[in-house]
Image (cartoon, helix red, strand yellow):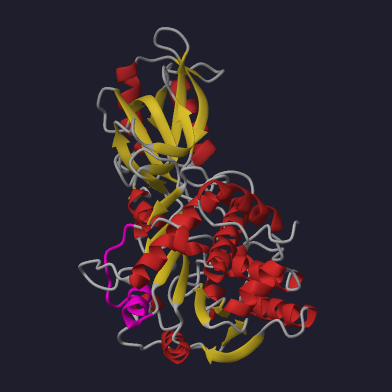
Amino acid sequence: MLAGALGARPAHGADTGANASALWDAWPHTVAVSPFALKHEGLRAHVAALARRYPGLLTIAEEGVSAEGRHIPLLVLGRGPTTVLLWSQMHGDEPTATSALLDVLEHLGKTRKTPDTERLLSRLTLAIIPMLNPDGAERTRRTNAQGIDINRDALRLQTPEGRFLKAVRDRLKPSVGYNLHNHSPNVTAGRHGPQVAISLLSVPYDEAFTENEGRLVTKRLAVLVQRLLEPFAKDRVARYDMDYTARAFGDSMTRWGTPTLLIESGGFVGPDEANTLVRLNFIALLGTLHALADGSLANVDAKAYDAIPLNTHDRLFDVLVRHARVIGGGGLPPYLADVGLMVTPARPGFSGPSPRGMRAGVLEVGDLTDFLGKTEIDLAGRLLVVAPPGGEDGWKKTLAGLAARGLATAEGLLTLSESGLSAEAKAWLGGAPSLAPGYGGDFLVLQPAGEGRFRAERRISPVEP
Ligand SMILES: [Zn+2]
C-alpha cells in the first residue's frame, strides 16, 4: 500500500472512494473464528498476542471486573491530545465490533512506522474496551450476569461493568466516544431501501435533540462512515431510529461531555455475512479515526447526516412467500396472500431486546408487496397449504389416509377440489391453530396438475434443519 493512502487525502468528496478502497484492502482479518465464537478467554489471548507481536504499541491500562469476576481490559495506545474512547459488546450477543477493534489494533501495530499511523498515534490517544460484558458474551446473551441491560444502567450504575465504563469516562474525559453494537439483521434502510448493514446515530443528549459542537462532530463521523462504506454496502447504511434515552450510556456519555457515535451492525445476506460486517466496521473505525487525526473530518458536511435514510423495522422477513393461493386450515376458501416468516437461526446469533426477534413462525399474512425477504419464494399459480403436524412422516400418513378414501393416488397425486382440500386441511390440523401471525407449523406447496389434481412440490418450514 502507498504511504499516505489511508489518511492523507481529504476525507470527503471525490477522494473518499480511493480512501475507502485502501481501507478495504488493509483489513487484516485477524480473528479466525466467528465473532460470536470469540469469548473472554479468546479475547485475552488475542490481546496478549498483539502485545507480544508489537511491543510498546498498547498498554492494558487497567482492568474492570465483571459481576462474575472476569477481567475487562482497557487498552490504551497513542499519545495524542485528543482522547477517543471506544467500547464494544456491552451487549454480550453483539460481538461484531469486538473483532473489528482487534483488527484495527493489528493494523496499527503492523503499520506503526508509516506516516499515516504515526500521525494517528501522535494526535490521538485511543482508549479501547473491546468486550465490556464478558459474562453476557460467555452466554451469548444481551444482559450481564445480573440480568441487567448495561446500556440502561448509566444512571443507577448497579452493574460493575457500567461503573467501570463510567469511571473510565470520568477519568479520561474523552473528546469522542464510539458505542459499538449489533441490531436486528431484519431492518431496512428507509421504507424502500435494502437490508441495513450498518446503522449510525449521532447520539442526542437531551429530549430536544439539541445540536452542539459535539453533536456536529458525531454527525460528521456518521456522514463519513456512510461515504466510506458506500462502495461496499451501497444504500445499506442507515440512521438508527432511537429516541433520547437518559438511562442509556451513549446518551449519558454525550451529556457528560463525551459526544458519542453509535455504530450498530445489522445484516449482510450472503456468504460470510459475519466477516463482511467485521470488515465494514474496520473501515468505519479506522477511516474515521484517521479523519479525526488529520483534521479532515472538519471538511465533512454535518447537514448530510439528516439525509441518511432511517432504519425501518418489520419490512424485511427471513422468508417471504409471494403470490400464493393460501389454504390456512380454517376451512375457508383459498385466497391470494403473501406470507412473511421468521426462521429459527441455525447458529447462535443476535437475539436482541425484542421477543419478536426470537420467535420462529409467521409474522404477517396479506399484501406484502412493499416488503422484502432475505429469501423470497414466488408461488404464483401454486397453493400454499398448512401442513399436517409430524413433518414428512405426518404428511405420508395423511396422504395414505387420503388414498384410502380415494382422494389421492398411490403415486401421491391429490385428487380433490380446492374446497375439498380446504376441508381436509382443517381436519388434518386436528384443532391446532390455523394460519395467522404466530403460526409456527410447516407449509406444503401444491402444484396444480390439471382440474381437481394437485401434486406436493416442496415443504416450507420456519425451523431450519
Ligand atoms: Zn446493543
* Magenta residue span: 241-257
Residue 397 vertical placement versus 291 (above, below): above
Instruction: Give the residue drawn at x 42%, y 32%.
Output: 321
369 and 414: which is toward the camera: 369
Location of ligand 1 given as a quarter of the image: bottom left
Residue 21 visible to the viewer: yes
Magenta stretch holds residue 402? no
Residue 107 visible to the viewer: no
List x then y, in percent, for residue 166: 41, 87
Q: Quadrant of residue 112?
A: bottom right
| Residue at the outermost left position | 208
Horizontal side of 17 relative to 434 (left or right) equals: right
Magenta stretch holds residue 242? yes
| Residue at the outermost right position | 53
List x then y, in percent, for residue 412: 53, 20
Could you tell me which quadrant the N terminus lies in?
bottom right
395 and 95: which is toward the camera: 95
Instruction: Give the residue drawn at x 70%, y 53%.
Output: 25
Instruction: Give the residue drawn at x 66%, y 87%.
Output: 59
List x then y, in percent, for residue 200: 42, 59
Residue 355 vertical placement versus 271 (above, below): below
Instruction: Give the residue drawn at x 75%, y 79%.
Output: 49
Residue 92 vertical placement versus 171 (above, below): above
Q: Quadrant of residue 108?
A: bottom right
